[in-house]
Image (tube, grey):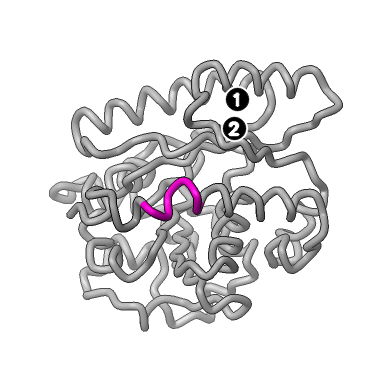
Amino acid sequence: MIFSISNQKGGVGKTTTAINLSFYLAELGKKVLLIDFDPQSNTTSGLGIQTKESDYINSYGLMLDEASLDVEKIYKYEKNQNLYVIPSTIDLAGAEIELVSAISRETILRKRLKDLKNMFEFILIDCPPSLGLLTLNSLVASDYVLIPVQAEYFALEGLSLLVDTINLVKTDLNANLDVGGVILTMYDQRTNLSKDIYSEINKFFSKKLFSTIIPRNVKLSESQSHGIPIAIYSPHSTGAMAFKDLAMEFVRRFDNLTLLNPLSNRK
């Protein structure tokens, strides 16, 4: 089952969610592939992966190299053997330009992930903070979209635009795409604004909004600067506990669908 982690607004906790949700899913024994699909490579650096020294496939090669894929070509994260990572490099920034003239350019990633889909229980793609060709490829390849939303007013405006984009993709390119969940991030329970944002999101996404809320927590930022997940950097912090709870809620929501949902075998 493939998930795009997407929001065209930057600074909403998208990469933080990608890193820590993936790691905790792996900690729960799930075989997980995390793809850094953002040329800024924040997920890659946030995991402490040195892409220049790696002989494994990166996201640029994933899009432009037509060689067959197998697990042996994918980096296995040393701090958890259930987590595999396809890192990003700055080269990915040129991929959108190189793909402009490609045939069926919107479906390249879906075709590339076809062989990998049955090798992993969950594939999570950290999308760039834009709605360009890379994000479009990710949405076309995915079964679900996970939407991190910062507990601030302007985040709601970006959420509306993203939902419109998802509906367009669903109509024209991927009829099976659906919103898998909305994740409220950087929540500050001391402020009325955070509570108001939660209330507004819950009105429109009551069935999609995860009950687990990610708090504003300095340890989460610190962990990425040290290149390790929060589970290792500060396992008893409020941020760590929240992401652990989110992973468990995620498994409850999607685990059975891996076998029961026909989308999981979609070509």
Residue type of the residue flagged with mark 2: Val
> Which mark is drawn over residue 92?
none
Residue projecting furthest to the right? 190
Characterize the local packing of mark 2: few (<14), some (14-19) or many (20 or more) Cα atoms within 10 angstroms. Answer: many
Place residue 267 in its image quadrant: bottom left
| Residues at marks 1 and 2 touching, judged by CB atoms closer than 8 Å | yes
* Residue 87 rendering spot, x and y as whole percentages: 48, 66
Which residue bears the numbered disc 2? Answer: 149
In front of the other: 255 or 153: 255
On the image, the x and y values in percent for residue 211 come to 61, 36
Q: Which residue is mark 1?
A: 155
Can residue 104 be found in the magenta stretch? Answer: no
Q: Image quadrant for the N terminus?
A: bottom left
Label 1 sits on a secondary structure element that is helix
Which contiguous range is marked in magenta?
Answer: 251-256
Residue 252 in the magenta stretch? The answer is: yes
- Relative placement, left or right, of 236 versus 25 is right
Question: Of 198 and 164, which appears nearest the observer?
Answer: 198
Q: The residue under label 1 is which amino acid type?
A: Ala
